[in-house]
């Protein structure tokens, strides 16, 4: 099978195209990793390389749980995972790719931004920054997820996405935690309220639930409510935490997908279209005609007829 490679060349005079730059490309078999090299090639004023592998470009706020329950796993599991995450080529951490800010959360006074956007662009230097984190400096009691989201909303992402760090790049929050919010009265409601304020700005929230299976079963449902959708949450125990890296990156780099459902548009990353009816995505649910049902509780029969999972489908 022959593949057709189409290269679109733009000659720009007096101004540059106002869209994100693809910082890596190949010309005549040679790889160029920076914008000036591509622009100088053969004297072209500008050149864009059309690729079938989109490069991830996000402004990503990583929110890391540093409550005391993480202590036993931080050096052996969490820190190596974070270093592999930020250096993963699919995340594409760079000045013109994904830029990262880092926040830690535990008790209120220890919940803060450790690294602002625009401070470190290089993936290896970012990994070095993470490697130098000292547990005694960042640990804290409680799990003030509510404060973390409040800071994210009020100080990091103050505007609607994407009008924050880079005005043409989508904003994403990725929270990695091993438990429910706790530490003050009504903390879960406060957490959900602050998470919703972030999502109302069009900012995607993805989550990683880590810890034992019993622990995850307890707090994952709440993490799914904080996230953009249940499908934006991944999970693993600490010893296998690296197995969720690709899924976490996929959820982070996912592009909004507007599609038609009947005469309405819907976001296929967060919603399902069931025969012209739009539903918010839920884990373990699927369409049955226009209905959206739990596969554990029901089954879909002919003519979109729902019956209890314990019952037999009617015979027509």
Image: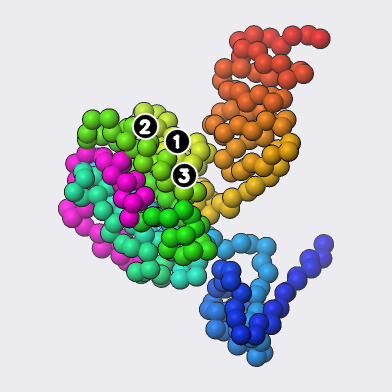
Q: Is residue 190 visible?
A: yes
Query: Does 101 appear in magenta?
Result: no
How far from the left and from the top, in percent, is residue 64?
Answer: 32, 49
Residue 219 is marked as 2
Using the numbered discs, state the Cα–Cα distance from disc 2 to disc 3 in whole angstroms: 23 Å
Query: Does 140 appear in magenta?
Result: yes
**Quarter placement of the C terminus:** top right
Residue 224 is marked as 1
User: Residue at 57% of width from left, 63% of height from top?
Assistant: 55
State whether residue 122 is above or below residue 178.
below
Along the line of sight, the residue nearer the viewer: 186 or 160: 160
Q: Is residue 115 left or right of residue 256?
A: left
Along the line of sight, the residue nearer the viewer: 277 or 99: 277
Residue 200 is marked as 3
For label 3, the SS is: loop
Q: Give the mark count.
A: 3
User: Main SS of the magenta segment?
Assistant: helix
Q: Residues within 10 Å of mark 2 (few under 14, many from 20)?
A: some
User: Residue at 47% of width from left, 44% of height from top?
Assistant: 200
Using the numbered discs, state the Cα–Cα distance from disc 1 to disc 2 in whole angstroms: 9 Å
């Amino acid at each position: 099978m022959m593949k057709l490679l189409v290269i679109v060349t733009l000659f720009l005079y007096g101004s540059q195209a106002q869209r994100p730059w693809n910082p890596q490309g190949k010309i005549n078999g040679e790889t160029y990793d920076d914008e000036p090299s591509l622009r100088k090639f053969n004297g072209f004023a500008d050149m864009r390389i059309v690729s079938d592998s989109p490069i991830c470009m996000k402004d990503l706020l990583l929110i890391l749980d540093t409550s005391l329950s993480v202590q036993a796993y931080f050096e052996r599991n969490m820190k190596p995972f974070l270093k592999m995450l930020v250096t993963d080529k699919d995340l594409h951490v760079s000045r013109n790719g994904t830029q990262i800010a880092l926040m830690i959360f535990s008790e209120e006074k220890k919940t803060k931004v450790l690294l602002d956007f625009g401070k470190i662009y290089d993936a290896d230097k970012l990994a070095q920054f993470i490697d130098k984190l000292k547990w005694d400096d960042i640990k804290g009691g409680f799990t003030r997820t509510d404060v973390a989201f409040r800071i994210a909303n009020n100080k990091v992402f103050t505007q609607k996405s994407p009008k924050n760090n880079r005005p043409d790049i989508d904003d994403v929050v990725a929270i990695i935690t091993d438990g429910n919010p706790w530490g003050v009265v009504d903390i879960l409601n406060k957490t959900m309220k602050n998470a919703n304020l972030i999502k109302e700005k069009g900012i995607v929230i993805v989550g990683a639930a880590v810890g034992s299976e019993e622990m995850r079963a307890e707090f994952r449902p709440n993490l799914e409510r904080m996230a953009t959708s249940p499908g934006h949450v991944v999970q693993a125990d600490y010893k296998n935490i690296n197995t969720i890296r690709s899924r976490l990156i996929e959820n982070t780099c996912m592009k909004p997908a507007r599609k038609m459902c009947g005469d309405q548009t819907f976001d296929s990353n967060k919603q399902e279209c069931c025969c012209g009816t739009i539903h918010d995505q839920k884990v373990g649910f699927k369409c049955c005609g226009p209905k959206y049902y739990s596969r554990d509780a029901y089954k879909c029969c002919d003519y979109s007829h729902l019956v209890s999972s314990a019952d037999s489908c009617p015979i027509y």
